[in-house]
Image (cartoon, rainbow, N blue to C red):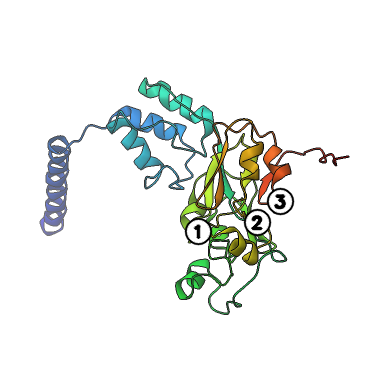
Amino acid sequence: MTNVMTPVILVTVIGLVCAGLLVIASKVFHVAVDERVSQIRECLPGANCGGCGFAGCDDYAAKLVEDETLSCSLCAPGGASTVEAIAEILGRSAGSSDPQVAQVLCNGVCDKSRKNHEWQGLQSCKGAKGWFTSPNACMYGCIGLGDCVEECEFDAIGIIDGVAVVNRDNCVACGMCIKACPQSIIKLVPMKSQVHVLCSSTDKGAVARKNCDNACIGCMKCVKVCNFDAIKVEDNLARIDYEKCKSCGLCVYECPTGAINTFRKLKPKKKAE
């Protein structure tokens, strides 16, 4: 009987000793965790998309508590309600929380743009761009092989007629498509802004138009017609100042190539008598 009990007692004693050591270690090495981190984490949507610039929701929550200057509005999927909740927990101003959406600044659809060659390799924009500047004649346009589509977790972007197109209803502005695009032609824009220059070419007008019928040719007509000083031509490309733009659509009417587009339904332009 003694031979049987001896190992049982030894195991019990060892267990008690280890438990005691663990308790002591937990006290000695205890790191206080600010309860606000867990409160903020509960407010975040849990997408872990990285759109805020951090590794995930946990990392963003911790950094918000550590850095008092860090914006509360970096979580695009959470929207305004999340921003307000975080600001209340931290006792800060919510700041601007205007919703944003991804926008592809290219309209070089198949029948309007020219190609240098057909890419036969791995169906990847980065792969194609790695071997050549681009399969397209326009080196600035959408390659259309869907790297952005693969990265999007919200079914908010797809390839239509050779060009990536964002589904604004599904987009949460996480920015993953922006990181995936080797052409850097996807940008976050204010959701309320309806007018966009769907071109990224900085080639001179004649070259840009030769490569794509829908290209901006830097003609300045949009600048002259704008009543709000909201559009400029820089490096042969029209660029919209979204803070000034009223989405009136005058530049859309005036653009001779259709490079400027709007989500608003505009009335047909009256013909001059």
Sequence-first disc among 2 and 3: 2
Res. 106 image quadrant: bottom right
Q: Nearer the viewer, residue 243 or 120?
A: 243
Q: Quadrant of the N terminus?
A: bottom left
Whether residue 169 is visible here, answered yes or no, is: no
Q: Give the alpha-carbon distance from disc 2 to disc 1, as whole Å.
A: 15 Å
Q: Nearer the viewer, mark 2 or mark 1?
A: 2
Give the residue drawn at x 50%, y 58%. 181
Give the residue drawn at x 39%, y 23%. 89
Q: Give the alpha-carbon distance from disc 3 to disc 1, as whole Å.
A: 28 Å
Q: Residue 86 location, x and y as percent? A: 42, 27
Sequence-first disc among 3 and 1: 1
Amino acid carrying mark 3 in the image: Pro
**Tag of residue 107:** 2
Q: Identify the residue position indicated by label 3 in the image.
A: 256
Q: Identify the residue position indicated by label 1 in the image.
A: 181
Neighbour class for label 2 at 10 Å: few (<14), some, many (≥20)? many
Q: Does 125 sit left or right of 53 as displayed?
A: right
Neighbour class for label 1 at 10 Å: few (<14), some, many (≥20)? many
